[in-house]
Image (tube, rainbow, N blue to C red):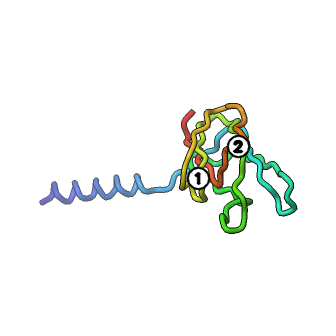
Amino acid sequence: MRLRHTLAAALGAFTLVVTLPTSANAATGAFSYKFTGLDGHARSVTLHDPTSPGCVPLPEVAAPDFSEPAFAPHNDTDEWAMVFTEPDCTGDSWTLRPHGNPASDRLKLRSVFLTGRH
């Protein structure tokens, strides 16, 4: 009986430690992309040292019913990045290597996931 209580307490403590939130890290470098503004002109946005790992929705293009997707992503961070065609890191995805070349204007995205992997 005593072993069961000890085991249950240890399991509870382990579960608590595993579920505690961890501090957010940041990728080092910049992730940039372009989007078409309301005036029809291309605009550029750069995210400096974006939060990682995690999904970053792109606010300018987050509403598919009201905006065209962003395009021409450039991952100049020290981490792998996955770009997604839909908000909240859903839809089709492509992986961009760390410190890679800018992608084509044909690559469309609405969110990006920084992997935390170098």
Q: Residue furthest front?
A: 106
Q: Position of residue 94 (x, y in %)?
A: 57, 42
Give the distance between the C-alpha atoms of the residues marked 1 and 2, in whole angstroms.
Answer: 15 Å
Q: Position of residue 39 (x, y in %)?
A: 87, 61
Report crowding for label 2: few under 14, some 14 to 19, many 20 or more residues within 10 A (C-alpha). many
Q: Amino acid at mark 1?
A: Cys
Tell me the residue at 31%/58% (across/down): 12
Kindly identify which residue carries mark 1: 55
Q: Position of residue 54 (x, y in %)?
A: 57, 50
Left or right of 56 on screen, residue 34: right
Tag 2's secondary structure? Answer: strand
Numbered-mark total = 2
Q: Is residue 94 above or below residue 100?
A: below
Marked residue nearer the N-terminal end (1 or 2): 1
Question: Toward which corner of the image does residue 7 lie, by quadrant?
Answer: bottom left
Q: Which mark is residue 87?
A: none
Q: Amino acid at mark 2?
A: Pro
Foreground: disc 1 or disc 2: 2
Q: Position of residue 73 (x, y in %)?
A: 70, 43
Q: Quadrant of the N terminus?
A: bottom left
Question: Toward which corner of the image does residue 4 lie, by quadrant?
Answer: bottom left
Report crowding for label 1: few under 14, some 14 to 19, many 20 or more residues within 10 A (C-alpha). many
Left or right of 11 on screen, residue 89: right
Tag 1's secondary structure? Answer: strand
Q: Which mark is residue 73?
A: 2
Using the image as rendered, state which of residue 76 and residue 104 is in the foreground: 104
Tell me the residue at 68%/38% (across/down): 75
Q: Residue furthest bottom?
A: 65
